[in-house]
């Protein structure tokens, strides 16, 4: 079950691409990037952002929150931020969104790649989104049984 839920979590996370990253007590909207076979999440940001400044420290802990009704994933992910100058990773995650922010492309002097290494997560995996939730609640009223709202568990990552 544990490996299955980890795989389900990663698959859904890959299809979402956005969340809120906690840095110094503030949650910032961010778009994460994933690379096949790599357990880390990757962010592209500017060097003067609170995220890049925080990641410059050693062992910086951060939380990344996911809430996607459409993909049926809700997660509170704990992990560690660090700066990266890995050109291969940057090539792997570079895309249209990043190119909109950095006029000089991957060579923009203001660009900073940030690695987020998740170590554990509390997750809720559901089916059917808001309609599925309402259906399960209505069904529970008719059957007298508790609604099946999916899986709620904590996992260790990667």
Image: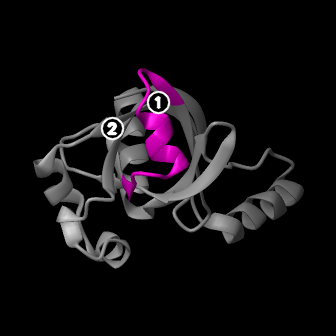
| Occupied quadrant, residue 5 | top left
Q: Residues within 10 Å of mark 1 (few under 14, many from 20)?
A: many
Q: For mark 1, what is the residue?
A: 79
Residue 91 percent across, percent down from the top left: 14, 59
Query: Which residue corresponds to the image point at 24% horizontal and 65% vertical from the top-left?
Result: 108
Residue 62 percent across, percent down from the top left: 54, 33
In depth, the one of 156 and 53 nearer the eye is: 53
| Occupied quadrant, residue 56 | top left
Q: For mark 2, what is the residue?
A: 83
Answer left or right for 105 relative to 64: left
Q: Quadrant of the N terminus?
A: top left
Residue 72 percent across, percent down from the top left: 56, 58
User: Where does the magenta region start and end?
Assistant: 44-61
Position of residue 17 relative to residue 85, above or below, is below
> For the residue labelled by badge 2, is the local secondary structure a helix, a strand or a loop?
strand
Position of residue 114 relative to residue 14, above or below, is above
In depth, the one of 39 and 71 nearer the eye is: 39
Query: Which residue corresponds to the image point at 79% horizontal and 44% vertical from the top-left?
Result: 146
Answer left or right for 27 relative to 7: right
Answer left or right for 39 relative to 101: left
Position of residue 77 relative to residue 33, above or below, is above
Residue 58 percent across, percent down from the top left: 41, 21
Magenta segment includes 12: no
Query: Which residue corresponds to the image point at 68% horizontal and 49% vertical from the top-left?
Result: 149
Query: Which residue corresponds to the image point at 42% horizontal and 53% vertical from the top-left?
Result: 13
Q: Quadrant of the C terminus?
A: top left
How does the figure colour the protein chain or chains? one colour
């Amino acid at each position: 079950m544990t490996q299955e839920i980890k795989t389900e979590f990663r698959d859904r996370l890959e299809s979402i691409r956005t969340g809120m990253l906690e840095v110094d007590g503030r949650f910032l909207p961010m778009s994460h990037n994933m690379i096949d076979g790599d357990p880390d999440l990757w962010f592209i940001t500017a060097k003067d952002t609170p995220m890049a400044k925080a990641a410059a420290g050693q062992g910086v802990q951060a939380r990344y929150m996911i809430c996607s009704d459409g993909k049926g994933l809700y997660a509170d992910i704990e992990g560690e931020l660090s700066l990266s100058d890995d050109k291969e990773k940057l090539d792997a995650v570079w895309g249209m969104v990043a190119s909109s922010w950095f006029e000089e492309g991957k060579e923009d002097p203001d660009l900073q790649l940030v690695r987020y290494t998740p170590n554990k997560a509390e997750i809720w995996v559901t089916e059917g989104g808001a309609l599925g939730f309402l259906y399960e609640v209505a069904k529970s009223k008719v059957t007298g049984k508790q609604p099946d709202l999916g899986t709620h568990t904590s996992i260790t990552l990667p």
